Structures are given as structure tokens and as C-alpha cells.
Image (cartoon, grey):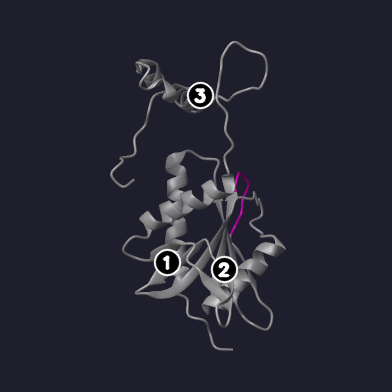
Amino acid sequence: LDEVADGWVHPDTVDRVHFTRLNAHYEPALRLAQLILRNLSLIDRVGSNDASAFMVDMNDLFQRYITSRLQTLLRGRLLVEQEPPTHLGKGRQVRMEPDLVFRRAKATVFVGDTKYKLSPDARGRSSDYYQMLAYVVALGLPAGVLIYCQESGDAPQREVVVHNHGARLLTYAVPMSGNAAALDAELSTLADWIVAESAVVPVPA
């Protein structure tokens, strides 16, 4: 969607759309978009208005959004690949697909995984760390990052250094409570942080 420009849409724009039999099927979606633009929501109770409902996989949405923004923000600095297949064991055993793999001049330099789980203190779950450790080991990297959605609270970046290995398992919480401009600024900071982390050379033990 590179050809689509970002722009602000006023909620009243929907009211100016003339619906006919040819575009009537778009009306429920547009009315729902209008509610969202007005920062309103639907309530499931008796009323006079019809509305369409749907389920959103927030894990998938968060992953796709973070991936798309990082691909744009890191263009010319790092190549961002989404879910490239790799394997944990020799002979292509145990297939894995990290959410984000970062490459510089065709060399893999960093790996990331997105988690839409609110983490006020930016600490990952044990299973998330196990998963990231597998990615780091399989790709031969010194570090990887778990990128979390953060709703509120102060959350500095933290790291776990793996015992008897030295791999650094990092966490980064992206605040999601601000407006679009604030969120884009946060993601720009994340992109710069990834560039810096991907350039870190491990110190021999």
C-alpha cells in the first residue's frame, strides 16, 4: 500500500457518501469506521440501529503493524523479513518462523518476536524467553528482542543473559496509549534501537 497516502478522515465524511445498490454492501463497514473515528463503540443491547460485528486477532494485527512500520523506518539501514523459515536442528529439523529477522548486506544480524500481551514492567513470560532463545541459537546471534504492546506505565528495556551461553534476551515495550504521531515516534525510537543493538559484537568469553 505504498501508493496510499496517510491522511486524517473526519467522521462526518461517511454521511456525505451516497449509497446505492452498487455500493450498499460497504455501508455497515463505513458506519463502523465512523464510530471508531468518533472514539465510540458498540453495545450489545436492544436498540434501533443495526450494526455488523467482527473479531480481530490482535496478536496478528500487532505483528503486522510493527513489521510494516519497521520495514519502512529501517529502509536503507536493515532489511526486515517477516516470518522467514529457519530450523533449530541439523538436517532441517524443527522448523521455526521468527516474526522478524533483520539482515544487513544479506547477513542475519538480529531477530525479534512480537507479543500482544500487556507487560507493564517489560518482562517477558518464560515461554517467550524459551522461544527467543531457540531463535537466537538457531540463527547464531548474540541477542534477540521480544517486542511487547504496553498500554501504560513506565517500562524500561530489560535483558536476560543466558547462563552458560551468554545470549542476551531483550524486551522492548511499545507504548500504545498515545495518538498516532506519538506511536510513530516510539516506533522510530525502536528502529534506531534495533540498528544499535544489531551492531553489537559479542565479547569472547
* In the depicted structure, whether residue 92 falls above or below residue 59: below
**Residue under label 3:** 35
Q: Which residue corresponds to the image point at 53% horizontal and 85% vertical from the top-left?
A: 203
Closer to the camera in the image, 119 or 59: 59
Q: Residue furthest top?
A: 48
Q: CA distance from mark 2 to mark 3?
A: 40 Å
Q: Secondary structure at mark 3?
A: helix
Main secondary-structure element of the magenta-colored stretch: loop
Task: State which quadrant residue 191 falls in.
Answer: bottom left
Q: CA distance from mark 1 to mark 2?
A: 24 Å
Task: State which quadrant residue 15 falls in.
Answer: top left
**Residue under label 2:** 96
The quarter in which the N terminus is drawn is top left
Q: Residue furthest left?
A: 3
Q: Which residue corresponds to the image point at 66% horizontal and 59% vertical from the top-left?
A: 123
- Residue mark closest to the camera, 3 vs 1: 3
**Residue under label 1:** 195
* In the depicted structure, whether residue 13 falls above or below residue 162: above
Amino acid identity at mark 2: Met
* In the depicted structure, whether residue 33 falls above or below residue 191: above
Amino acid identity at mark 3: Leu
Residue 42 point in image, percent of width and height: 60, 24
Give the magenta part as a residue range: 150-156
How packed mark 2 is, by other alpha carbons closer than 10 Å (few <14, some 14-19, many 20 or more), is: some
